[in-house]
Every structure is written in structure tokens, then in C-alpha cells.
Image (cartoon, rainbow, N blue to C red):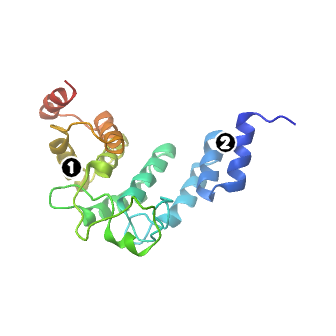
Amino acid sequence: MIHTIFEQAEAFIWKNARLLERQRFAYHFKDGSREAVLAALRPYQNTDGGFGQALEPDILCPDSQPVPVQHALEFLDEVGFDAEMVQRICDYLTTTTTSEGGVPSLLPSAHGYPRAPWWHSEDHPPDALNPTAALAGLLHKNDSQHLWLEEATAYCWSKITDLQPTEMHEMATVLTFLYHARIGCVQKKNLTRWSA
């Protein structure tokens, strides 16, 4: 029997995917519910409001990490933000933000658990546009309000103004921010300089 590409993809998901991906698939293609996606996502959120528990499969750390938080916001963006979940996310981000206003890509707590070899952190990791820009961009896209977002937005504009594109993952987060950030007069001037 010949199956369509869609049928093959669906079979692969049912055989291999986590419950979260199954519920996302059902939401997008099988008239599944938003609440089922949220229910599958909630166990990945820790008591501190961040996300871990191997939500990012390359970081098996149960503790909250910035990149899994980014993924959580991406999944929420698909189905509609949950106000309580996002409030807790933003509260968590305030605890991991450096004095410059951004969050690191990886926190040292990941070192005690299996992870892909490219995931390594210093003992005191610096802030980074990746994932700060993506986090801020997704929050802007969904009209979130939080003090962390104000500080992160200022941080992103300060880092992007003279940025030279070098690394694709960083640029993807920057583009997410540029596409969705609320742009004031000063930022419009900086954006013009950056894109020229």
C-alpha cells in the first residue's frame, strides 16, 4: 500500500514523538485542542517558572535553562500564550539576566547532565543575543507586558545596532526580535543603520 508523505509523517510521529509533539501535531492537523498542548507542555515548567526537563533534547538537564524557555515560548506562540505560564517565564528570566540585560545561552547547571558537545558554559556565563533576542521577540509578538521585556528590549537594541552577521543561530534570533519588537523613533533610526 502506498502512503502519502503526510501519512508517513503521521506514522513516524505516533511511533517516535513525545506526547508534546503528538499534541502539537493533533492541534495543527487533526483538530486537536489548545488545552491538550498546554497540558503536555506544563510538566516541563519548573517551580522557578523556567523550563528544563529535556524540553530541548540536546540539553537533558532537569533545571531551567534559557534555550528551553525559548522553545516553550515558540510552542505557546503556536497555540496562543497562556498568561500564567508566561508570567512565570518572565519572572524566571529576571533571575538569570546579567547586569547588561540579556540572558546567557547556557547556565552551568547543565554540566552535571548529558548534553550535546556544543552545549558548554563558563562558570559565570555572559549574556547573549541568542536566545535573548528570540525570547524578547516572541514576547513582543504576543503583546506581553513585563519589566524583563523592557530591559531585554533595550539590551537587544544596544547589541544589534553595530552587529555584523556571522553566525546563523544568532541571526535567526535577531531576525525574530527585529520582526516583532515594538519600534520607537530611536530604534527606527538604529534599525535603518543596521539594515543599510
Question: Is residue 23 left or right of 2 when viewed as pictured?
Answer: left
Q: Mark 2 or mark 1: which comes first in sequence?
A: 2
Question: Is residue 38 left or right of 137 when viewed as pictured?
Answer: right
Q: Where, by quadrant of the figure, is residue 179 drawn?
A: top left
* Above/below status of 109 relative to 27: below
Residue at the spot 16% in from the left edge and 37% down from the top edge: 161
Residue at the spot 25% in from the left edge and 53% down from the top edge: 128
Mark 1 neighbour class, 10 Å CA radius: few under 14, some 14 to 19, many 20 or more: few
Give amino acid for label 2.
Asp
Camera-side residue: 128 or 154? Answer: 128
Mark 2 neighbour class, 10 Å CA radius: few under 14, some 14 to 19, many 20 or more: few
Give amino acid for label 1.
Glu
Residue holding disc 1:
150
Q: Quadrant of the C terminus?
A: top left
Secondary element at tag 1:
helix
Residue lying farthest top? 196
Secondary element at tag 2:
loop
Q: In which quarter of the image is the N terminus?
A: top right
Residue holding disc 2:
31
Q: Where, by quadrant of the figure, is residue 84 drawn?
A: bottom left
